[in-house]
Image (cartoon, rainbow, N blue to C red):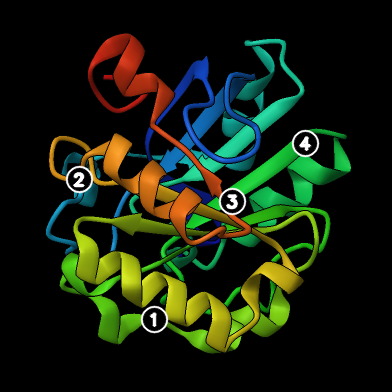
Amino acid sequence: MSEERSEQLKIHEIFYSLQGESTLTGLPTVFVRLTGCPLRCVWCDTEYAFTGGSWLSMDEIMAEVAKHQTAYVCVTGGEPLAQKRVHLLLDRLIAENYTVSLETAGALSVADVNPDVIKIIDLKAPGSGEMIKNDYANLDLVGARDQVKFVIADEADYQWAVETMQQYTINERCQVLFSPVADVMSPKQLAEWILRDHLPVRMQIQLHKLLWGGTPGT
């Protein structure tokens, strides 16, 4: 690999939108979406980011982020941790005083993620088709500012999420998010289950899909 390429990331898109998920929902945010993902979840809504994109230097990425004049940056994918040099970007964003969140599928280790980055780990439920890829060791690496998200397609996913949260005491380690699969799981039904079972979780509905009907930036 050339020295020039060693300082680059393959970026599918950089765009400015409202954060649609997590505890930062509603905040104007710059999204840096990296190309590529080793998972193939049944309900994935960013398949377009599996391929394509352009190689950009760290300086080019930072310049594009700065154009949008916001304190919040979300590094997402695809699976951003599939590109090892993403840590260079995360470190630089933190060094320049951005509030940075990282959306990761939870299949790759977050051990090397800058401790000032908010980790949002999407544990895969059975309905995703990729549950076997979960790296549960990541749950030992989360703190109070971090979040573990369960995307739920049906009652079986819900029960698995509850049992997993309890088994690993996730709600005692970090914040827990339950989210319905869009157009598959009834948000009202999920809300009723959460209230019935008195779960210590935050339910979320993807704000960007309510506003624009799709993934942020599309």
- Pick the residue in front: 109 or 135: 135
Residue type marked 3:
Leu
Q: Secondary structure at mark 3?
A: strand
Q: Is residue 127 left or right of residue 200?
A: left
Q: Quadrant of the C terminus?
A: top left
Give the mark nearest the N terminus, 1 or 3.
3
Say the numbered circle drawn on residue 185.
2
The residue under label 3 is 102
Q: Check disc 4: other Cα within 10 Å, few if <14, some if 14-19, many if 20+.
A: some
Q: State the SS at label 4.
A: strand
User: How far from the left and from the top, in percent, is residue 174?
Assistant: 71, 64
Q: Residue at x 22, y 39 (%)?
A: 186
* Residue that mark 1 sits on: 134
Q: Amino acid at mark 1?
A: Asn
Read off the residue under disc 4: 99
- Circle 2 SS class: loop
Q: In the rendered structure, which disc, 4 or 1, sits on the residue that comes first in sequence?
A: 4
Which residue is painted at 27% across and 79% down in the image?
131
Q: Nearer the viewer, mark 2 or mark 1?
A: 2
**Front of the two marks 1 and 3:** 1
Q: Nearer the viewer, residue 188 or 179?
A: 188
Q: Residues within 10 Å of mark 3 (few under 14, many from 20)?
A: many
For discs 4 and 1, the disc positioned in front in the rendered view: 1
Q: How many marks?
A: 4
